[in-house]
Amino acid sequence: MQNFVFHNPTKILFGKNSVPSIGAETVLFGKRVLLVYGTGSIKKHGLYDQVVQSLLAADATITEHGGVQSNPLLSHVHEGITLAKENNCEVVCAVGGGSVIDEAKAICAGTPVQHDVWKFFTGKKSIKKTLPLTTVLTLAAAGSEMNSGMVITNDATSQKFGFGNKQLFPKTSILDPSVTCSVPADYTAYGAIDAVSHVLECYFTTTDPYTPVQDRLMEGLVINAMESCNRVLAKPDDYHARADLMWTTTLALNGLTSSGLGKVGFPMHMIEHSLSAFYNVPHGAGLSAVIPGWMRFNARLQPERFAQFAERVFNIHTGNVEEKAKQGIDALTGWFSEVKSPTSITALDIPGTDIPRIAANAMTLAKVWRMREYTEEKIEAILNDCV
Amino acid sequence: MQNFVFHNPTKILFGKNSVPSIGAETVLFGKRVLLVYGTGSIKKHGLYDQVVQSLLAADATITEHGGVQSNPLLSHVHEGITLAKENNCEVVCAVGGGSVIDEAKAICAGTPVQHDVWKFFTGKKSIKKTLPLTTVLTLAAAGSEMNSGMVITNDATSQKFGFGNKQLFPKTSILDPSVTCSVPADYTAYGAIDAVSHVLECYFTTTDPYTPVQDRLMEGLVINAMESCNRVLAKPDDYHARADLMWTTTLALNGLTSSGLGKVGFPMHMIEHSLSAFYNVPHGAGLSAVIPGWMRFNARLQPERFAQFAERVFNIHTGNVEEKAKQGIDALTGWFSEVKSPTSITALDIPGTDIPRIAANAMTLAKVWRMREYTEEKIEAILNDCV
């Protein structure tokens, strides 16, 4: 086990009827609130009214910044920062999924400084101070509600970059599973796939050979992400299944699984970010198109690890190590198909001839994330396994 | 899944050479430090010198309060509170295992008030404010380094009571597994058993029938507590096995497993506390003497739950539900025997004729903990299964 620091100070309020606490939780940090949300679904289902009423009842003054897209754009982040500055906002409240929360984090980081917030993403500046953030989560997927990371797409340069800083942990996040009951089947599955990917990237990129307790936690989370997703798809308004999936996706990327693993990478995300940046595919769909190929490529390098995954997650006990590894990858790929998510870039209508430009784009992120084991050639080879 | 609040703000510094950070981490909260430790083992192994040097290098003024016993005594807590008051201590630094950390927490709670700190344990007063606490952990067992609970024995009344408050989370805890390499085999096993008990009590006392992700995490932690303990016993100075056991015992009682389970009880601890109070048996040894009997008694009431435990933790797949449940209990009892911990109160030389007075004592704690499903008769019946 490698040395680590674990310090996750986010307060989680989980459960039915927890949304009306958002006002009181938010004004703890200031009364001038920037309210960040997406493109309207929260207004359809009454959530917007609930949040605004709660904020107003807590004497907040609200500046609104709606219209955040999935794969949130830097240009829109800039607009939010301008609004927050003009209105002297003291705290940001995000109501949405990972995209909304990530954009809110970027606004929290960019508001106290005079330079372009993008400089944090490219490593040219480091965060000293941010606005505090509270969130109401509407999608079980990204884990941003309980971690210190964010991902933003620079629409001027077609770069989708991620970045983390301990100041970006939300102060309080409200997770009411019933809010997610209206999420359609495809995005429910994409969310579960995102969580599975977060776990697998830690599981397969750790270079520490001795992480038994983390392995058990990660295997349990992958099993449960799949099982809870299946139950939700069978019965979309099953509160308990929604709750189980929601908490699983939060735990999948809150620092718990990666503590002690040393440096881990997010190569599946690194490649998928290029698919999102070029083709604006849903993040989870892009991941399930990349994961099987990435796993096939890497199972050759560490078959024992992939065999352990197959044994413990899919109860595969026949064949030699390589055969078990392959069966485990096939079983996971089979589950992607069951939940109707693409299992190749071909299924996303991305032509194989685009692979070089995708690899070149992904390589720019590999450099920023210091994933030195990746070259353009290697990424191309992996993408060739994803066709 | 039940509604819950999860908020664990403790910062963990885990790994080799982390102890010298204790000075800087502690003086963040004040320079006048009460240093709390046990009965001398930290002086044998150089740890005491390391901590004192680090504190002095950070310009701390140290008031010492050593001599904490396992099953720490209220009378000794009182002495610590007097010292902290007399020296205007601003922060408490605990160096030891769960007993030392628990006594330090009681001192943190009792120093800012004029009344007897015991009133917090009996529910007659509630905590408003505490001194901040930092810790250096020397024993993988109790989990107190990352939770808000504490257990103290009132030597005047022979009551061993536990109590929790969110203000009692340590600010920072330092976990260097190499510090635990000198822990002897018996106390290593007792520590692992304590962690197993913490998990099982949540697992078997939840009244929520739908806790899939928590189940997976709890099952993984039990498997890993046993496996890592076995590896440590086979090779006591195996750093990685020590690290694995240490982080497992911390995760076993940091709020992660119980979030969403609703009200859980700690009936094994409730009964064991009476054994410790009367006979001063090591906590883990008392637990392993009680757990098999408690499980046999309760498996009759919820055989499916015990069968799931047997299947997932011990790979038991033969027989009907009741038979699986029994095999699971036998397997766990067998592991207690393997690690040389007693599996009955008889093995602790406690005569069966003492059962009524043990049950009467345990009942006083059942009342304080509001475990309404317990009566003296029921506790006696369970203890009769522990002979």
Image (spheres, coloured by chain):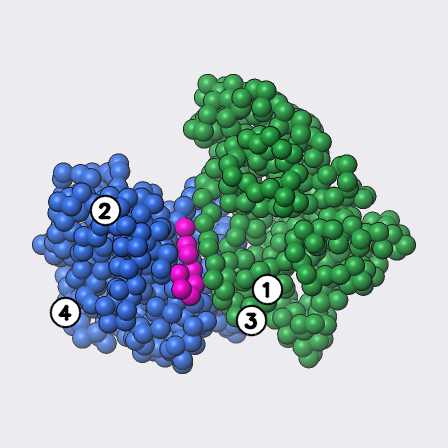
Chain colours: A blue, B green
Q: Residue at image x 71%, y 76%?
A: B322
Query: Which numbered circle lies on residue A32?
Result: 2
Residue A229 in magenta stretch: no
- The alpha-carbon separation of the residues under discs 2 and 1 comes to 41 Å
Amino acid residing under circle 1: Thr
**Discs 1, 4: same chain:** no
- The alpha-carbon separation of the residues under discs 3 and 4 comes to 52 Å
Nearest the viewer among A107 and A214 is A107
Marks 2 and 4 close (CB-CB < 8 Å): no
Instruction: Report which residue position mark 1 lands on.
Output: B206
Residue B363 on image: x %, y % = 75, 54
Amino acid residing under circle 3: Pro
Circle nearer the N terminus (2, 4): 2
Say if B98 sits above or below B315 in the image: above
- The alpha-carbon separation of the residues under discs 1 and 4 comes to 55 Å
Sort mark 2 into few (<14), some (14-19) or many (20+) by Cα contacts within 10 Å.
many
Marks 1 and 4 close (CB-CB < 8 Å): no
Task: Work out which quarter of the rendered image holds the C terminus of chain A and state it.
Answer: bottom left
**Discs 2, 1: same chain:** no
Left or right of A366? Residue B226 is: right
Res B205 quadrant in image: bottom right
- The alpha-carbon separation of the residues under discs 1 and 3 comes to 8 Å
Q: Secondary structure at mark 2?
A: strand
Label count reads 4
Residue B57 on image: x %, y % = 47, 19
Instruction: Report which residue position mark 4 lands on.
Output: A353
Query: Which numbered circle lies on residue B209?
Result: 3
Magenta span covers which residues? A11-18
The chain under label 2 reads A
Say if A307 sits above or below B20 in the image: below
Res B309 quadrant in image: bottom right
